[in-house]
Image: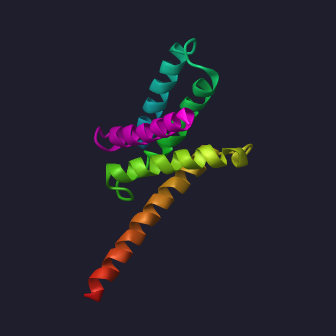
Amino acid sequence: MVFEILITIASTLSALSTYFISERLNQGAVRASALVTFVVSIIFLLLSKWISDPYYTQIPVVVFGASFVGMVSSKILQQYLSVAFSGVIFSIIYLNLSPYFSGVGGALGTTACIAVICTYGFLELRNILKNKQHKKF
């Protein structure tokens, strides 16, 4: 349970920090993703003696994959809450479906794309339902 919570936190923070660096600091999506992944990888490399195996091997991978979520355009997801929600969805997909992506190239990018599409679809559905409620009255 602790592992899953840490994966979800790492995923959410990675997506948010990548989005922040890309959009607010105007560094671009690729540079932001690379920076977040590089910093976390170096930290885990330096602390490898004190971090047990599943955390040491999985969290940097999750951070790398979730940074793809943060690469989303602000035209698609405009709010940090939406990006955070996508990060959570990424972690859920990663934790539950990653064995099925074994051997598939681009699995992390595909997972990130699915997470963003789910969030975007949820937001669009919410807007449609909100507009239908206003039309009834």
Image position of 114 with respect to 64: above or below: below
Q: Is residue 40 above or below residue 135?
A: above
Position in image of residue 123 (x %, y %):
39, 65
User: In the image, what residue occupies the spot 47% across and 47% down?
Assistant: 88
Quadrant in the picture for the N terminus: top right
- The image quarter containing residue 57 is top right
Q: In the image, what residue occupies the spot 29% across and 38% down?
A: 25
Q: Is residue 55 left or right of residue 67?
A: right
Dominant secondary structure of the residues highlighted in magenta in the image:
helix
Residue at position x 60%, y 45% from top? 94
Position of residue 103 measured from the top left corner of the image (x, y, whole percent): 74, 43
**Residue 27 visible to an observer of this rendering:** no
Question: Is residue 4 located in the magenta-colored stretch of the structure?
Answer: yes
* Farthest residue, direction bottom: 136
Residue that sits furthest to the top in the current view: 49
In magenta stretch: residue 126 = no
Compared with 111, 1 (above or below) is: above
Q: Quadrant of the C terminus?
A: bottom left
Residue 121 place in picture, x, y as percent? 46, 65
Q: Which residues are magenta?
A: 1-27
Q: Residue at x 45, y 37 (%)?
A: 9
Residue 124 visible in the shown view: yes
The quarter holding residue 33 reads top left
